Image: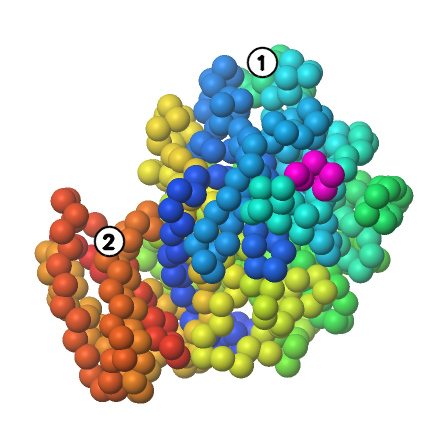
Amino acid sequence: MKKIILFIFLAINQLGISQISNYNLVLEPLTIQGLQGIQSFAFGQFEGKWLVVGGRLDGLHRRQPWASFDANGNNNQLIVIDPVNKLKWSRPLSELPTSIQEQLSSTNPNFFQDGNTLYYVGGYGYSVTAVNHITYPKLTAINLQGVISGIMNNLPITQYFRQITDNAFAVSGGRIEKIYETFYLVGGHRFDGRYNPANNPTFTQAYTNQIRKFNIIDDGINLQITHLSPFTDTANLHRRDYNVAPQIMPDGSEGITAFSGVFQLTADLPYLNCVNIDSNGYQVNNNFSQYYNHYHCAHLPVYDSINNEMHTFFFGGISQYYDSSGVLVQDNNVPFVKTIARVSRDASGIMAEYKLAVDMPGLLGSGSEFIANKQISHYENNVLKLNEMQSDTILAGYIFGGISSTLPNIFFINTGMESSASSQIYKVLFVNSSPSNIATLNPQSVGSLHIQVYPNPNGGDFSINYHLKQTTDVSIVIYDTAGKILKNEIIKSSTKGNKVFSTELNNGNTTGIYFVTLKTSYETASQKIIVE
């Protein structure tokens, strides 16, 4: 049942004008031919190449126990992606030992990259050995350089995997982060057996209700785990399938924040509060409510050291609330949404949430990951250093994968056709702009390009006005809400001044919403187009 909350939810910066307000957020689609869709996976990277492990190749899990988390939807490949050269390679898991290949085909694992090693923990899936669906009590260490190079050059890779068994790691749907030298496995649950929404006795489920702390002693050959005393809190740590992000705390120390998560003890609804974690313990923040981006989605943490403000961006996913023309709508069916929002913490620790003007292209984001551009300045805990952004356009990283849904609410009608795993990649760009703008992809002309589409709405024929402040190559990309590129034009050495690019969409049924992204050597801008 939907309920309209009768107040306007405006993206007003209650924390004051900070450097983050000087940047627009732009999403630019990047397509790699032959790349299969995937969601709820693990990843690591080495020298700009990504290794994608685990996850599922289908969309939202079905309700029927015989069809839900079907082994046919397992990702049984190790995938290497080069986003710069738009290339991909893959190798089957079948060449690895059975215990490793089974765990690495699981979904919703907990993972963390520490230097050149990707630690892959837990995960849920069908085990041929156990003849059942299980949450794997395993930690697998993956040498990223060795595996990525081996896959790209068709060399042996088995020697780059090591695995240990430990019941403390039988967790799915949690997240691992690191505070200084200690690892924190936050939340999650152990789920064994076949999923059944009617709660018939086909499975057992136990939330960890914990923050599990441990140290890893790893010399590249031997793995040793030292478990530390966990934090246990049934009321506040009963969370899974959510966003846990590294933070720089107001006192300058490293920390973690667990945002939202499911399910509340007394209702099948997400938590709205958050849990802040540092090396001294954890604190539940009941003075802050997060209305958007409740399930796990791609997220990006950014710290402004001048103003001592921490900002975390969330990209789409699933949420109990969404914005409709400035009105916050509550939907207790918890639908797929396209909201991009930012949660900010000021120097005094006060947190606030802001919906950005830019949306995800389509109902995309759940089960996706943000893969950072390691070439830009960041802290040891992977938080981006906002104040060291010097260029007009900064490639912060990429959004990859996730569930793409055709409708907001599909859970009760899901036949397996209403959603799919996305293969789309989006570049995430920070573009220097005036302080009054929060984001692009809105109806206003922004930045020095002064991009405008007319007429808008239109019938498929339209023109794009823009202004160049210098001679530059111009890239014009038009794509639909699913990220499919319909036009990709490059104008070489275009001289400065006012320009007009006229075009027509000829893709059959053109009715709908589209986006145009215009990119030069010094700036990127985007505009929404409505075709009626």
Q: Secondary structure at mark 1?
A: loop
In this rendering, would 65 be left or right of 441? right
> Does 35 appear above or below 386?
above
Label 2 residue SS = strand
Q: Residues within 10 Å of mark 1 (few under 14, many from 20)?
A: few
Which label number is shown at residue 486? 2
Q: Which residues are magenta?
A: 156-161
Q: Quadrant of residue 252?
A: bottom right
**Residue 276 numbered tag:** none
* N-terminal label among 2 and 1: 1
Closer to the camera in the image, 145 or 76: 145
The residue located at (35%, 79%) in the rendering is 447
Residue 13 drawn in magenta: no
Q: Which quadrant is home to the N terminus?
A: top left
| Mark 1 residue type | Asn
Does the magenta run of residues contain 160?
yes
| Residue 522 coordinates in the image, percent (x, y) | 39, 79
| Residue under the point 60% across and 31% down | 93
Horizontal side, residue 158 vs residue 45: left or right:
right
Residue marked by disc 1: 200
Q: Would residue 505 be seen by someone viewing this image from the given angle?
A: yes
Give yes or no for contact between labels 2 and 1 (Cβ–Cβ under 8 Å): no
Q: How many residues crowd mark 2 within 10 Å: few (<14), some (14–19), many (20+)?
A: some
What whole-number distance in Å separates the C-alpha atoms at marks 2 and 1?
47 Å
